[in-house]
Image (cartoon, rainbow, N blue to C red):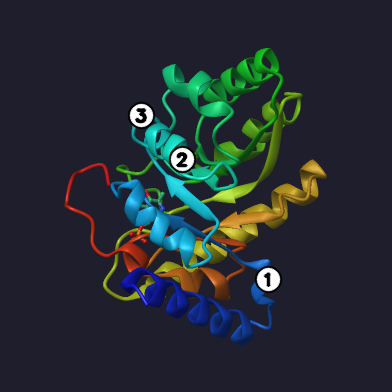
Amino acid sequence: MSDIARNLDQIRERIARAAESAGRRQEDIQLVAVSKTHPPETIREAIDAGQAVFGENRVQDALPKIDALPPETIWHFIGHLQSNKVRKALGQFALFHGVDNVDLARQMDRIAGELGFEARILLEVNVSGEESKFGFAPEALPAALEALIALPRLRIEGLMTMAPYAENPESARPHFARLRELRDALARTAGLPLAQLSMGMSGDFEQGIAEGATIVRVGSAIFGERPATPSN
Ligand SMILES: *Cc1c(COP(=O)(O)O)cnc(C)c1O
């Protein structure tokens, strides 16, 4: 068994246990294997180990990998999408986790219309208020959602956040709880299910699951440490 296959087994086991402790079903939590910086050969090992969904954060890095791997592989875009990449990205990614401004969303809607697609998106929220982070401020969400609901080619499926880096994974929990509360409030006022909560990475996915994550984005715990570059 490869290291990647073993890591995936362990992550799935931990997801199952975290789900059980939270009184949730494992099937309700989707694992996105974050494959950014890793080559197709490495991703193929994860596919061979039964992993179907992968996360990438740069369009130009992802496209050659998407071409090189089987067409049934499912790709999620987890990064900050630049407006000049929208057209290239739209048909390639099943879900966009990091939509963080209304102009970008409008552009995605317009181009999706031209191409005949729908774009499934999550709104990224800067729950912690850290200046270095992307995402809507929580206070800005109700107005943003109101503007976005009117866009016919967008399917707004939920919210995404990143907790601030911390030694102790438990410190992520209040941020994840806050995202869930924001979702609950928005879903009520907007009358949309906003069913997806994308929260939790290698260091804190169990805390995400405890607070209601339906998607966890796990990279280094599956593929090993990435070379350190600022945008990873
Ligand atoms: C890189 C990245 C991840 C995965 O991080 P790990 O700590 O390696 O699990 C998850 N989400 C986003 C948005 C990322 O950019």
> Can residue 189 be seen here?
yes
Residue for badge 2 = 135
Q: Residue at x 59, y 42 (%)?
A: 95
Residue for badge 3 = 60
Query: Who comes first in sequence, dot 1 or dot 3?
Result: 1
C-beta proximity under 8 Å, tags 3 and 2:
no
Q: Which residue is nearer to you in this view: 41 or 102? A: 41
Q: Is mark 3 within 8 Å of ligand 1?
A: no
Does 189 appear above or below 215?
above
Amino acid marked by disc 2: Gly
Q: Secondary structure at mark 2?
A: loop
Q: Based on the displayed image, in which of its 4 quarters is residue 30 positioned?
A: bottom right
Q: In 3D space, how far apart are the residues under numbered discs 3 and 2 (Cα atoms)?
A: 22 Å
Q: Residue at x 45, y 49 (%)?
A: 55
Residue for badge 1 = 27
Q: Residue at x 32, y 42 (%)?
A: 131
Q: Quadrant of ligand 1?
A: bottom left
Given this view, does label 3 or label 2 mark the residue nearer the observer?
A: 3
Q: Is mark 1 within 8 Å of ligand 1?
A: no
Q: In 3D space, how far apart are the residues under numbered discs 1 and 3 (Cα atoms)?
A: 32 Å
